[in-house]
């Protein structure tokens, strides 16, 4: 059993603090956005091919779709294949939420000597916990010692000196370094032979919306030819898909525009809240229609949010929704504080 539950296996319950209705005149369900907005607030679950870098792949999509801004959630080495979340236009604002989400890989470790199966399984199991890593020489970050959490390592099989295993880990874990360390533990040395990412946060290779570069080019071409939004839905998902692992807070329509202007979320604006929120937790704030408003950091726990009548429950880290989508029902008070009218 894993020593730490992967983020995608954490179960939460949405608690109701208050009841309210949403006005259909403002905003809309993410799946019902007009085509231009669907692209602007979209993500792509891309199956990256071997060869190009993650930046090159993102640049090709940017060119294909004639976009101004594009991003991706977690760099893959050129030879590595698999899940690469790509964020379009306004959705790039939440790319940080993807960078630190959990990842899963299937890896082939090439040992430099013969080792029996029992020893291999035992060596892999030693890394199921918090580990220390120093990024390899060929990395895009500073080479300083840091900790990363391994949720699980599942041995699959081995043939000769090739070992096939699956690993679930915290974002920013270097599997190449993990392979090297396993080889050192076994006393024969080893290196990463092949690697494929099978999950990045909520995005999985088995998803119906997992697409290739050819799929993106074809379906976007079909959209341009027919102007039918259904062609966009074949390869684009709303940005809200990327936030499903974060604990969420649902707010009133009257609170939305104040949040879009950077105001802290206060207790009267909260309608529903997920269980498991602790002080300091990164949270996602949604409308009653399911639209992402902002990312924030909780100032109190779930139970305190439910019980509170006044005061700030979260401060914003990143606003995701544009201003004026919902009506302005607030005013700026003395000292620049936001107050309801």
Image (cartoon, rainbow, N blue to C red):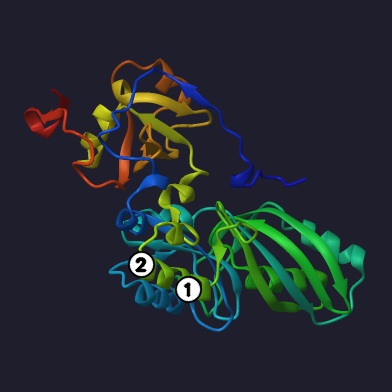
**On screen, residue 138 above or below 27:** below
Picture coordinates of residue 24, whole percent (x, y): 30, 32
The quadrant the C terminus occupies is top left
Q: Nearer the viewer, residue 140 or 318?
A: 318
| Mark 1, secondary structure of its residue | helix
Disc nearest the viewer among 2 and 1: 1
Picture coordinates of residue 110, whole percent (x, y): 77, 79
From where the camera sits, is residue 140 visible? no
Query: Position of 169 compared to 323: left or right?
Result: right
Residue under the image location 50 percent in, 74 percent down: 213
Q: Nearer the viewer, residue 310 or 122?
A: 310
Q: Do the numbered discs 2 and 1 sit on residues whose CB atoms are within 8 Å? A: no
| Mark 2, secondary structure of its residue | strand
| Residue situated furthest left in the rendering | 334
Q: Quadrant of residue 163?
A: bottom right
Residue that numbered label 1 is attached to: 218
Query: Position of 118 compared to 251: left or right?
Result: right
Residue that numbered label 2 is attached to: 70
**On screen, residue 30 above or below 142:** above
Residue under the image location 75 percent in, 78 percent down: 190
From where the camera sits, is residue 128 visible? yes
Q: Residues within 10 Å of mark 1 (few under 14, many from 20)?
A: some
């Amino acid at each position: 059993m894993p020593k730490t539950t992967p983020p995608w296996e954490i179960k939460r319950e949405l608690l109701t603090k208050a009841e309210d209705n949403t006005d259909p005149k403002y905003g809309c369900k993410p799946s019902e956005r007009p085509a231009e907005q669907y692209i602007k607030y979209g993500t792509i679950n891309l199956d990256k091919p071997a060869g190009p870098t993650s930046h090159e792949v993102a640049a090709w999509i940017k060119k294909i779709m004639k976009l101004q801004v594009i991003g991706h959630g977690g760099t893959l080495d050129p030879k590595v294949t698999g899940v690469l979340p790509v964020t379009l236009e306004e959705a790039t604002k939440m790319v940080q939420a993807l960078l630190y989400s959990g990842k899963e890989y299937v890896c082939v470790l090439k040992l430099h000597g013969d080792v029996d199966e029992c020893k291999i399984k035992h060596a892999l199991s030693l890394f199921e916990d918090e580990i220390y890593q120093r990024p390899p020489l060929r990395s895009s970050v500073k080479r300083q010692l840091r900790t990363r959490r391994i949720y699980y390592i599942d041995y699959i099989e081995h043939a000769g000196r090739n070992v096939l295993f699956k690993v679930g880990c915290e974002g920013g874990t270097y599997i190449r370094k993990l392979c090297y360390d396993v080889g050192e533990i076994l006393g024969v040395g080893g290196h990463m032979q092949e690697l494929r990412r099978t999950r990045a946060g909520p995005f999985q290779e088995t998803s119906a919306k997992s697409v290739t570069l050819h799929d993106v080019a074809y379906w976007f071409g079909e959209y341009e030819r027919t102007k039918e939004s259904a062609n966009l839905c074949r390869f684009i998902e709303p940005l809200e898909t990327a936030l499903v692992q974060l604990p969420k807070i649902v707010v009133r329509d009257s609170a939305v525009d104040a949040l879009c202007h950077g105001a802290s979320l206060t207790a009267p604006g909260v309608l529903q809240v997920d269980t498991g929120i602790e002080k300091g937790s990164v949270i996602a704030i949604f409308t009653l229609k399911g639209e992402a408003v902002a990312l924030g950091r909780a100032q109190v726990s779930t139970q305190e949010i439910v019980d509170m009548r006044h005061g700030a429950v979260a401060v914003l880290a990143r606003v995701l929704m544009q201003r004026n989508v919902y009506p302005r029902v607030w005013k700026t008070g003395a000292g620049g504080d936001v107050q309801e009218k």
